[in-house]
Image: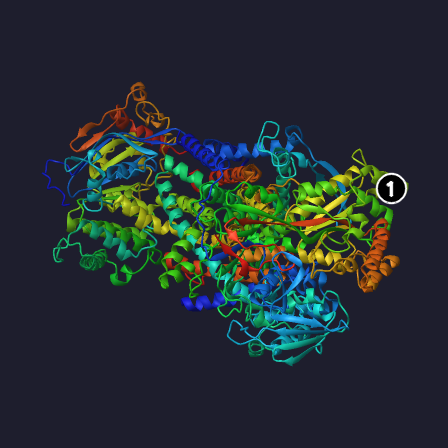
């Protein structure tokens, strides 16, 4: 199925008040409470947050790949080109997945099926989502003819698979196509993965920590690869990571997620320039900068709350130095502080004001 | 909850299954009365022949095959075991010396392979038996006791003369036994011939006889199939089954079922299972007295010294519950046996007039033991035992239901007498080994079947001493006065003198027993009523030529 | 090595998981029933064997059971005074089944106990010290494992002669290699782990490492294996006695009862049915229990 | 390393194992306190000189170790000695009985494996649903049933109470077995186009095959279920779904192939269980195969036969496991033959 052409004012993907719970034996894990954000055509959107804050859950919910049981999407909307995916039947989603929306996963080691060759696995997507005009598509019930047609299509798909391997800059794609995952390095597998997921030129590519499992040099290559593929194909990329560096260099817009909430969202530069949410600020401080000399790194006091019994109101307030009464009662809405920059905090202003103080406090020599 | 539901359903189905299954136990399945495979006779039996070779066959399954595949010079008819009738021999005569016998053969006899039968074959057959002297079964002794390789001479192609090495009253009876069957010289010479002291492998599995049937195929442990011998001199006019199938089914339940649904015309049914078929329609239970006797053996040489004491053996003879054995182990299918000689044989009455001396009488046993000083002087768990709790070792061979019953009830009785006992079972070879090569037993069960129809085949082996060529059962029994009377009886010709001798022997023996004479088997089989022409003959067990279905 | 309270927490969690699965609980209950029945057999059964002391081939004496025979009431169908009916010796099948539980339990525990012990010792040594010892042991176990359980046991038991003790010996001979294998594997795996290295580095001697560090940490899989094998042992034992190698005639042993009842199957269904059900339920119990244990000790399920 | 090289190496590695087996069987069969010679010689009526001669023929007069070498030497000439129960060479007897047992075993596998796998998949994908619970219960009952008791109950139900199936044997009475081509009655009767024989053989196969196969089915079902559960949680399954593969295809193409790997191993081990089960099943259904032969031999202390049987079983079993390893390598590209 071809993605429906979208108008410019309509976001490619728009998630509205998404609420996803997990029913485990310890209790109900309220992974997503009311997550909302948009992704526009051909942009790169970054979603950032500590591990276990619900980034991946959001992505999987979008693909409707939440394992259920135990998971369950309670409410909300996921509009893709204006179509609410949560209301569509499974078949529609099967048509969309790998074609209009693809996803690449964190663990290249285990994400490929060990018993099939790379080529076969890529060809599978192509066979599923592409038609082959060059091959006669006559409806026949003669098993032999059917078989011949199928063979032809498979052959063609395999060629295309090799092409897409070539596209992700794999040297000697023919050889790789005939190899099994366990015969490839992590980087190679991730490339293969990308090749697989881009082989049908999707509108949206969800990349869930595509580089965490790889070593630094390879990381860089993979990211570059994704970048230029995006330029070539105009695919929107939704990049999930906890690596601020990656966000900084890749993303046009970024969403900061905390305990199942988007706490700050907007233009990457703006947010990096003046982060408004205490949590965002904490995050930004926790990365080393060569420009300023610091004796030690910021750390955010406390730890991620248990999502079975999350704190009332703003889920960050137990860790928040500026928390006021209201914070512990009702969750703050997203407020637009400047164009293309929203934050969900009641007292972001006070927070901003008192930054310097906090700063000095920290920098005072302890002797 | 799913699991509960699942469990419930599972249990329910189980219950239903069991109930439906068991509900069947009430309904007797009544079988259709149309005759199944009308020209075929099917017998379900235990075991299978060891061989088809007349010179080797000794066990009943094998001799049965031989009797129907081959003919002998003389034979029995129907259930008559007292007269001997001509078969391959038209007639015969014996010279006054009682040693020289002359047989005139039929002229019209062909072997199943078309060769004709004549005096050469007869001579060849007898000499073959003596030369081969079968290592496997040792059956040759039967001929050997009054013949050697020079005995048989050819007068003319259809007359043979046999000169015995010593007079023997049972000679004709002996010629009627399967070992004296006439085989085809040519065939055997073509297949391995005659090698001294070696069984002929080919003859084990093949047959070329003059008998009414010939071997179709033999699938080991499964079935033997005979088909009619078109060359049979008796001809095939009249009613005869054309095919004979002997299936080996070791499970009684199998045989019963086969009989009930008409797959079997004839089947061996153990006593305890007769109840299963007695009610079924279209089935007749065959009951005949057999020469097959059941004995209990005392080991007088046991390493338990007290077994050497005749008083102990007398006491134990009183401690065996004969009636219970007959009623419960054999469901009444057993005749009480007073001594060695079974009912139906001459000199039966020499044994206390045919009534048994010993009966189940614990008081008597108790008295004898106390009198001879074997007191209850050992205590274990508030019970008192004799012989310092030494256990009497009672053995029976595995898989023999009747003997198991007798053994266990004997144990029961012994414990009432304050005698500790162990009942054990083991496989036949081990059992034999124990009997022959060890003294690690005190009491064993054994059966004995006749080779041919003469009481001498019983007394001497049973109660004669080893020195006198007796003591077949290694009881270690040796009583010179018994021996002397036995020999008297054997070599005197005058019946009254013989009777007197046997009486004397019996009277001495019974006060110093080494055996307890339990009984004489009833021959029991199950049979479809549509099977005709069957007659029970204790010597020549089955003769299929007479059978037909209607 | 896990810290203590974490161990306890772990245990509680384990127990929770276990309780959650109905089937495992059923298994547990079945086994408890077996134990209780075996324990209170004298009070449960309506008839009882008497015991006599008999000498064995080895010159020692053993106590054998004797059941009084009542031919006058042979093969009676189930009734109030004989819930499972009577056999062809007029013995009360219910009582025999009840007492049979003792025999079965004895077989299971002895066979598994001894072969596990042998397995742990041999496998442990082989796995821990490796080298020639290991090679030899593994080759030997290869040979034993090349013959299916029942068949090897069959051959051995046949040679030893008919008696319960003999089939138990036969089964021990058959079973120990698999335990040796299992435990060896465990040792090999665990001895590479940090805490063992640590223990060694602080100078714990071999026996201490083996019994204080390796053994406790390999107990879980061993336990599962044992529970499952208890059932298997019972089945093989019953099979052997059914063929005619097991208990001496007249003793209450389920397999033996079935084989004796077989000739009477068509006119006395109860004779084979009830001992069979007894076997089925006990083995079922062990298997359910074993499965339950396997599930709760399986790290994959604990995530 | 090439497959055939691997096979050859494995076969060579078999030799010591087989020798070990012969040692076991030999020792086992020679501690028997029986007198085979007398048994051969026909029991109570045997003549002493006959017994002596036979004892000499069987080398029973030699010391044990010497007897062992006689035995080995015979084995090398494929001579397992003489079965006195059947009064013919053991090799011949086994040769006759092997096809029957093999037919039975194969039949039970043919029925057990597909059903087991299917059941496993179903209860895995419908985890904790009713059908899952039911098939789990069936499975666990299946491998808790005493096989001989099951056999008796089936006989009672389907051959006695409701006589719809034959009680015992391989063919109905009086039916001559098809001309021996493979020894498999089904195949032979088909080849010789003998419909009646075929149906009869088939009917006679039903109960024994079911009895024998039931526990195997149970175990395979259980194995498939658990491995399927594990596999369906794997990342590459998620990937497959992310590719837009239909659920059906996810299960049968991506899931099953991986889930089968452990199942195959279990199946190999089950082969041994089947051979053991054959001993009981064949005895009860009076099936003319090696198992019944062995049971009789064991009870009759026909130790040549026992040794022959055990040896054959061991060899078959070991080879079965070799085949499994090959299959294993075929299914799972990660497995390298000879890699330990």
- C206 lies above or below A332: below
Nearer to the camera, B229 or B463: B229
In this rendered view, identify the residue nearer to me: D21 or C1.
D21
Dot 1 crowding, Cα within 10 Å, few <14, some 14–19, many 20+: some
Looking at the image, can residue C43 be seen? Answer: yes
* Quarter of the figure with the N terminus of chain D: bottom left
Q: Which residue is mark 1?
A: B368
Residue B429 percent across, percent down from the top left: 68, 58
In this view, D23 is above or below B113: above
Spot occupied by residue D272 in the image (x, y as percentages of width and height): 50, 54
Q: Is residue D300 above or below residue C219?
A: below
Q: Nearer the viewer, residue A131 or B196?
A: B196
The image shows residue B461 at horizontal and vertical percentages of 77, 60
Q: Position of residue A163 (x, y in %)?
A: 20, 58
Disc 1, SS? helix
Left or right of B193, for residue B318: right
Instruction: Give the left or right position of residue B36, taking residue D250 as reference.
Output: right
Q: How is the image coloured?
A: rainbow
Residue in the picture at 79% in, 61% down: B470
Query: Is residue B85 left or right of C293 when viewed as pictured?
Result: right
Q: Chain of mark 1?
A: B
Of the pair A289 and B185, the residue shown nearer to us: B185
Number of labelled discs?
1
Quarter where residue B317 is shown:
top right
Report the residue that reaches farthest toward the left.
A7
Q: Is residue C147 visible?
A: no
């Amino acid at each position: 199925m071809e993605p429906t052409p979208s108008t410019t004012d309509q976001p490619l993907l728009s998630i509205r008040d998404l609420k996803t719970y997990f029913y485990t034996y310890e209790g109900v894990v309220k992974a997503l409470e009311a997550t909302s954000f948009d992704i526009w055509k051909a942009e790169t959107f970054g979603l950032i947050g500590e591990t276990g804050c619900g980034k991946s859950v959001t992505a999987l919910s979008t693909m409707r790949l939440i394992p259920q049981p135990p998971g369950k999407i309670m409410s909300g909307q996921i509009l893709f080109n204006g179509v609410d995916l949560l209301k569509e039947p499974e078949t529609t989603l099967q048509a969309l997945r790998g074609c209009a929306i693809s996803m690449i996963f964190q663990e290249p080691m285990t994400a490929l099926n060990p018993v099939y060759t790379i080529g076969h696995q890529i060809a599978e997507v192509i066979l599923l989502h592409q038609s082959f005009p060059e091959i006669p598509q006559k409806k026949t019930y003669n098993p032999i003819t059917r078989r011949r047609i199928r063979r032809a299509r498979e052959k063609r798909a395999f060629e295309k698979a090799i092409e897409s391997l070539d596209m992700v800059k794999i040297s000697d794609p023919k050889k790789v196509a005939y190899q099994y995952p366990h015969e490839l390095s992590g980087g190679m597998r991730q490339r293969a993965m990308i090749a697989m997921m881009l082989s049908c030129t999707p509108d949206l590519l969800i990349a869930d920590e595509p580089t965490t499992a790889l070593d630094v040099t390879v990381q860089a290559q993979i990211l570059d690869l994704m970048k230029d593929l995006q330029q070539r194909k105009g695919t929107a990329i939704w990049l999930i990571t906890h690596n601020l560096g990656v966000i900084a260099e890749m993303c046009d817009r970024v969403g900061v997620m905390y305990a199942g909430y988007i706490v700050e969202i907007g233009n990457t530069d703006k947010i990096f320039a003046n982060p408004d949410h205490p949590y965002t600020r904490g995050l930004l401080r926790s990365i080393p900068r060569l420009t300023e000399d610091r004796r030690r790194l910021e750390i955010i006091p406390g730890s991620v709350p248990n999502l079975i019994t999350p704190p009332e109101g703003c889920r960050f307030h137990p860790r928040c130095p500026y928390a006021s009464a209201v914070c512990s009662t009702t969750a703050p809405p997203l407020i637009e502080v400047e164009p293309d920059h929203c934050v969900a905090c009641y007292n972001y202003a006070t927070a901003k004001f008192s930054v310097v103080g906090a700063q000095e406090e920290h920098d005072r020599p302890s002797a | 909850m799913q699991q509960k539901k699942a469990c419930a359903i599972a249990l329910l189905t189980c219950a239903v299954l069991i109930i439906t299954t068991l509900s069947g136990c009430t309904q007797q399945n009544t079988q259709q009365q149309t005759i199944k495979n009308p020209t075929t006779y099917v017998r379900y039996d235990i075991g299978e022949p060891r061989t088809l070779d007349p010179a080797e066959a000794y066990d009943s399954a094998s001799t049965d095959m031989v009797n129907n595949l081959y003919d002998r010079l003389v034979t029995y008819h129907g259930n008559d075991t007292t007269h001997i009738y001509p078969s391959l021999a038209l007639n015969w005569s014996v010279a006054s010396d009682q040693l020289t016998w002359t047989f005139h053969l039929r002229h019209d006899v062909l072997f199943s392979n078309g060769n004709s039968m004549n005096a050469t074959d007869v001579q060849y057959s007898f000499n073959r038996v003596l030369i081969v002297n079968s290592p496997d079964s040792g059956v040759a002794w039967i001929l050997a006791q009054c013949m050697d390789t020079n005995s048989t001479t050819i007068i003319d192609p259809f007359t043979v003369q046999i000169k015995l090495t010593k007079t023997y009253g049972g000679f004709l009876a002996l010629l009627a036994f399967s070992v004296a069957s006439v085989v085809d010289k040519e065939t055997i010479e073509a297949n391995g011939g005659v090698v001294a002291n070696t069984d002929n492998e080919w003859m084990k599995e093949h047959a070329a006889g003059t008998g009414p049937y010939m071997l179709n195929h033999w699938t080991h442990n499964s079935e033997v199939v005979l088909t009619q011998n078109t060359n049979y001199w008796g001809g095939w006019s009249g009613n005869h089954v054309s095919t004979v199938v002997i299936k080996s089914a070791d499970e009684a339940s199998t045989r019963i079922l086969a009989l009930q649904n008409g797959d079997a015309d004839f089947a061996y049914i153990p006593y305890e299972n007769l109840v299963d078929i007695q009610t079924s329609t279209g089935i007749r239970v065959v009951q005949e007295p057999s020469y097959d006797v059941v004995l209990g053996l005392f080991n007088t040489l046991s390493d338990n010294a007290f077994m050497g004491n005749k008083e102990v053996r007398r006491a134990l003879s009183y401690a065996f519950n004969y009636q219970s054995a007959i009623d419960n182990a054999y469901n009444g299918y057993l005749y009480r046996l007073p001594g060695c000689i079974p009912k139906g044989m001459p000199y039966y009455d020499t044994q206390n007039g045919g009534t048994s001396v010993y009966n189940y009488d614990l008081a008597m046993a108790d008295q004898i033991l106390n009198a001879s000083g074997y007191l209850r002087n050992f205590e274990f768990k508030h019970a008192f035992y004799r012989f310092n709790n030494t256990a009497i070792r009672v053995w029976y061979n595995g898989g023999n239901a009747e003997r198991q019953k007798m053994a266990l009830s004997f144990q029961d009785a012994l414990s009432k007498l304050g005698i500790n006992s162990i009942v054990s079972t083991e496989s036949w070879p081990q059992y034999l080994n124990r009997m022959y090569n060890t003294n690690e037993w005190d009491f064993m069960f054994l059966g004995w079947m006749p080779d041919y129809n003469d009481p001498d085949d019983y007394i001497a082996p049973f109660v004669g001493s080893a020195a006198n060529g007796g003591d077949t059962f290694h009881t270690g029994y040796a009583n010179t006065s018994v021996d002397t009377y036995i020999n008297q009886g054997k070599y005197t010709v005058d019946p009254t003198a013989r009777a007197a001798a046997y009486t004397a022997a019996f009277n001495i023996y019974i006060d110093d027993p080494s055996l307890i004479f339990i009984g004489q088997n009833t021959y029991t089989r199950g049979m479809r009523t549509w099977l005709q022409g069957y007659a029970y003959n204790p010597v020549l067990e089955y003769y299929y030529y007479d059978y037909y279905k209607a | 090595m896990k810290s203590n309270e974490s161990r306890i927490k772990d245990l509680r969690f384990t127990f929770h998981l276990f309780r959650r699965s109905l089937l495992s609980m059923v298994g547990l209950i079945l086994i408890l029933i077996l134990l209780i029945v075996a324990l209170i057999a004298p009070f449960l059964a309506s008839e009882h064997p008497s015991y006599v002391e008999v000498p064995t081939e080895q010159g020692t004496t053993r106590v054998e059971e004797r059941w009084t025979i009542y031919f006058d009431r042979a093969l009676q169908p189930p009734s109030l005074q004989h819930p499972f009916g009577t056999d062809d010796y007029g013995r009360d099948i219910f009582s025999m089944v009840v007492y049979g539980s003792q025999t079965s339990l004895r077989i299971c525990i002895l066979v598994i106990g001894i072969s596990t012990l042998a397995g742990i010792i041999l496998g442990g040594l082989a796995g821990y010290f490796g080298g020639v010892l290991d090679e030899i042991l593994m080759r030997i176990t290869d040979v034993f494992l090349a013959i299916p359980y029942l068949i090897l046991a069959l051959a051995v038991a046949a040679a030893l002669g008919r008696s319960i003790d003999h089939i138990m010996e036969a089964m021990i001979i058959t079973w120990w290699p698999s335990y040796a294998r299992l435990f060896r594997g465990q040792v090999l795996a665990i001895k590479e782990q940090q805490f063992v290295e640590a223990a060694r580095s602080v100078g714990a001697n071999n026996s201490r490492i083996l019994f204080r560090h390796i053994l406790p940490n390999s107990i879980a899989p061993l336990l599962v294996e044992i529970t499952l094998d208890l059932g298997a042992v019972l089945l093989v034992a019953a099979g052997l006695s059914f063929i005619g190698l097991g208990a001496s005639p007249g003793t209450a042993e389920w397999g033996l009862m079935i084989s004796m009842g077989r000739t009477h199957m068509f006119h006395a269904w109860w004779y084979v049915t009830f001992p069979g059900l007894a076997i089925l339920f006990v083995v079922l119990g062990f298997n359910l229990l074993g499965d339950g244990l396997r599930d709760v000790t399986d790290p994959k399920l604990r995530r | 390393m090439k497959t055939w090289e691997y096979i050859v190496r494995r076969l060579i590695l078999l030799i010591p194992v087989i020798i070990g087996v012969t040692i076991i069987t030999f020792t086992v069969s020679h501690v028997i306190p029986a007198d085979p010679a007398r048994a051969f010689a026909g029991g109570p009526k045997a003549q002493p000189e006959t017994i002596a001669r036979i004892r000499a023929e069987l080398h029973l007069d030699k010391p044990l170790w010497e007897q062992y070498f006689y035995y080995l030497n015979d084995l090398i000439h494929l001579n397992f000695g003489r079965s006195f129960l059947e009064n013919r060479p053991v090799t011949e007897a086994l040769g006759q009985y092997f096809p029957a047992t093999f037919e039975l075993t194969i039949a039970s596998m043919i029925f057990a494996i597909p059903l087991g796998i299917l059941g496993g998949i179903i209860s895995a994908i419908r985890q904790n649903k009713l059908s899952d619970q039911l098939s789990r219960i069936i499975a666990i009952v299946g491998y808790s049933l005493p096989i001989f008791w099951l056999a008796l109950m089936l006989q009672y139900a389907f051959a006695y109470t409701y006589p719809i199936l034959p009680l015992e044997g391989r063919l109905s009475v009086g039916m001559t077995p098809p001309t021996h081509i493979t020894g498999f009655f089904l195949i032979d009767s088909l080849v010789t186009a003998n419909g009646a024989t075929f149906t009869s053989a088939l009917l006679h196969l039903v109960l024994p095959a079911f009895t024998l196969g039931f526990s195997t089915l149970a175990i395979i079902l259980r194995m498939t279920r658990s491995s399927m559960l594990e596999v369906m949680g794997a990342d590459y399954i998620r990937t497959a779904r992310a590719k837009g593969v239909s659920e059906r295809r996810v299960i049968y193409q991506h899931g099953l192939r991986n889930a089968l790997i452990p199942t195959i191993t279990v199946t190999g081990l089950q082969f041994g269980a089947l051979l053991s089960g054959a001993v009981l099943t064949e005895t009860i259904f009076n099936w003319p195969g090696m198992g019944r032969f062995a049971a009789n031999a064991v009870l009759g202390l026909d130790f040549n036969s026992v040794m022959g049987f055990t040896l054959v079983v061991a060899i078959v079993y070991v080879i079965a496991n070799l085949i499994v390893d090959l299959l294993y390598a075929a299914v799972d590209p990660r497995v390298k033959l000879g890699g330990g």
